[in-house]
Image (tube, grey):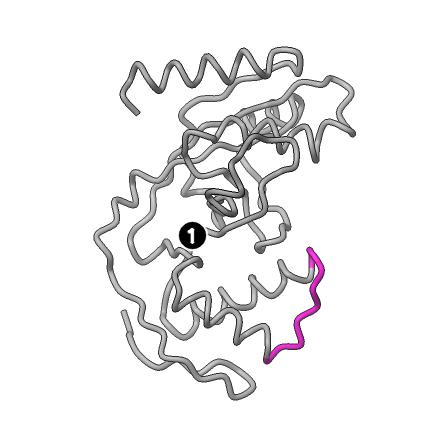
Amino acid sequence: MRIGGIIFNKGFNVDLYVYYMKIETHGLKGVHATTKSRLAEIRRNGFEIGVGERGAGIYFWKSSPFQEDLAVGWYETRLEPHDSCKVCGVVYSRFEVGADEYINLDENYLKEGLLCFCKTNNFENKRLAAGKIYDEFLERLEKDLGLDLKLVEVQVVPPKKSNYPTQIAGMASCLVARNSECIIIEASETVEKKDFETWKQAKELERQRSGL
């Protein structure tokens, strides 16, 4: 794995230090929210890569005490208006990636590199345009560092219809799987809109009993 000064296009030069951290990458988990019909497709055929505001991939809320809040909040905000069933599909997954296949773009040195990349590439401040910038930045990292990034951790604005404590914790962590083969589905279920609150409470009790 090469380490050192990486030269990005248009004269951007930054000392980008990528190192093998002692991260338990096999312990990374996340929750994906979808519709009931789409969940049935995922169970049959697996995930499909889609576009997103942090680049192409499959998006999961990183495992946390607020993962269910974020999942159903995303469903209510972005999916429910177009879903006649009013049923949220939830997929719990873990990820099989090596230390050189995972990167956290919230690390200060990478965030600075991303900002410089935006500055030198005439970034258009729109959602899908942002996704394209992320794709290009990650592709450049892979090329210059000899990486094969299958899983990327990013920060995103939490859905409006969630109880995530934005004023305390800031943005929420997402795991973006850029390769569906690294996703190991552990469980999946459906939840009707009328049951969201009781379902979230039940999940919280489960965590408390298991000591998580």
Does residue 147 lie above or below 86 as drawn? below
User: For the C terminus, which image quadrant?
Assistant: top left
From the top left corner, tell me how far across and down residue 23 is, in percent.
25, 49
Over which residues does the magenta segment extend? 120-128
Quarter occupied by residue 13: bottom left
From the top left corner, tell me how far across and down residue 39 is, in percent.
59, 25
- Which residue is labeled 1 in the image? 150
Q: Secondary structure at mark 1?
A: loop
Horizontal relation, residue 126 to residue 94: left or right: right
User: For the N terminus, which image quadrant?
Assistant: bottom left
Does residue 9 lie above or below 153 as drawn? below
Secondary structure mainly formed by the magenta segment: loop
Q: Residues within 10 Å of mark 1 (few under 14, many from 20)?
A: many
Quarter occupied by residue 99: bottom left
From the top left corner, tell me how far across and down residue 204 is, in percent.
42, 18
Q: Does 200 lie within the magenta span?
A: no
Does residue 146 lie above or below 6 as drawn? above
Q: Residue furthest bottom?
A: 11
Horizontal relation, residue 151 to residue 167: left or right: left
Q: How many marks?
A: 1
Q: Amino acid at mark 1?
A: Lys
Q: Does 125 lie within the magenta span?
A: yes
From the top left corner, tell me how far across and down residue 28 is, in percent.
35, 40
Seen from the viewer's position, the closer of residues 100 and 114 is: 114
Q: Residue at the location (51% across, 18% down)?
A: 200
Q: Residue at the location (36% across, 55% down)?
A: 101
Horizontal relation, residue 2 to residue 81: left or right: left
Q: Residue at the location (48% across, 32% down)?
A: 31
Q: Residue furthest left?
A: 22
Q: Residue at the location (69% across, 64% down)?
A: 125
